[in-house]
Amino acid sequence: MIDLKLLQKDFNGVSAKLMRKGVDAALIEILKEKNEKLKLAKASFETLQADQNAMSKEFGVYKREGKDVSELKAKVDANKIKIAEALEIQRDRHEELETLAMTIPNMPDDSVPDGEDEDDNVEIKKVLTPKVFSFTPKEHWELAEENGWIDFERGVKLATSRFSVSFGMGAKLERALINFMLNFNSKRGFEEVSVPALVNRAALEGTGQLPKFEDDLYKMEGQELFLIPTAEVPVTNLFQDEILSENQLPIKMTAYTSCFRKEAGAAGRDTRGMIRQHQFHKVELVTIANPEQSEEVFYEMVTCASDILTTLKLPHRLVTLCTGDLGFSAAYTVDIEVWLPGQATYREISSISNTREFQARRAKIRFKDGKKNSFVHTINGSSLAVGRTLVAIMENFQNEDGSIEIPEVLLPYL
């Protein structure tokens, strides 16, 4: 959540950053209105409180001098009622502003390039050179069918569109990739954790999926439980409403989970194949960090995810997301896009985001910073989307006869 104290201190600065991220001007005006109402309510309460303090001092003087205090006492009692009413109004105004603020995205860092969508993202660098094929490379769904690795029709039969079933080597490679990624991340200092696939509303509010993206989530009927859209949600919220000691930080974690998304906002996109499914496997990186560490840890996580692809010999590139493509909770994001020769383009396979204090403020994750409690920074990223990694292996390691080579690094896992 955005810092409400900063909002009151520098509304124009905050609103300018939010408008860079595409927040509607009308919503900014509502935010301004509610912010002004809270400031007025606070000022009214503080004035009444100051009057009360002055009258209390005067009351003491009257008592010492033996003066009649009945009239003054009546004023004090009447003012106490006004204070209670003013405090209630202030709480209501704060709650209204906080409720609205829960729907407002994080402010982008100043370094984030301006832009409207993914076409305005800025390439940082390319890693490895795509192979030049002597034949026209096939797309992964053709290869999946030819090799009997993935069955999309049976996925539909069992569930609905955008579900699939892996068979034989396809299923084994998914398991191999999961173990390879978890081991790789563990060697880089990320502790492996295993978390529930169902979380409550508070957890999703903490990381920013709720209330704004409820239409994309699968909800349990009759319960306030949701299937996770990413391991970022349960792993980050492991420390919800806790105060950590400074020497605990950074807390670096990695987790494998299945993820579930309705993809309500992606109708008509990537309807074939494995790129955009309702259920998919993913290995995640999450770090809870001291703000002074967050930049260093962020790039450590980017390097870790990139190095996995390099080890698999998969060409990829790193791009900085522009303001228009930045996620709801993110202040700064680097996407890793893997080369898919069947599509002759780079496609996102990992997204690493520094949310700064945004998620920590929502989830109330703090650390003991000297004598005061401060919000941590939370950083999260895919390491990697398993299905998309399998797609990249199929397309990059295909042969002319449709067979697929297996990356050497995965052989010990098979």
Image: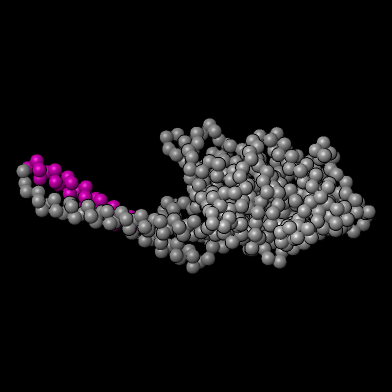
Q: Is residue 362 above or below residue 409?
A: below
For the C terminus, which image quadrant?
top right
Q: Is residue 307 left or right of residue 81?
A: right
Q: Is residue 304 left or right of residue 312?
A: left
- Residue visible at 25% across and 51% down in the picture: 49
Q: Position of residue 409 (x, y in %)?
A: 82, 39
Q: How is the image coloured?
A: one colour
Q: Position of residue 297 (x, y in %)?
A: 62, 40
Task: State whether residue 304 is above or below residue 224.
Answer: above
Asked whether 365 or 277 is in front, the reply is: 277
**Is residue 52 rendered magenta in the image?**
yes
Q: Residue at x 68, y 60 (%)?
A: 118
| Between 219 and 208, the one nearer to me in the picture | 219
* Residue in the picture at 70% in, 52% down: 280
> What span is in magenta?
41-65
Q: Per the image, is 324 magenta?
A: no
Task: Tell me, yes or no, if residue 28 can be seen here.
Answer: yes
Outermost residue on the top side: it is: 247
Image spot of residue 147 (x, y percent): 87, 52
Tell me where residue 374 appears, x and y as whole percent: 47, 41
The quadrant where residue 254 appears: top right
Name the residue: 9% across, 49% down. 69
Residue 379 can be seen, yes or no: no
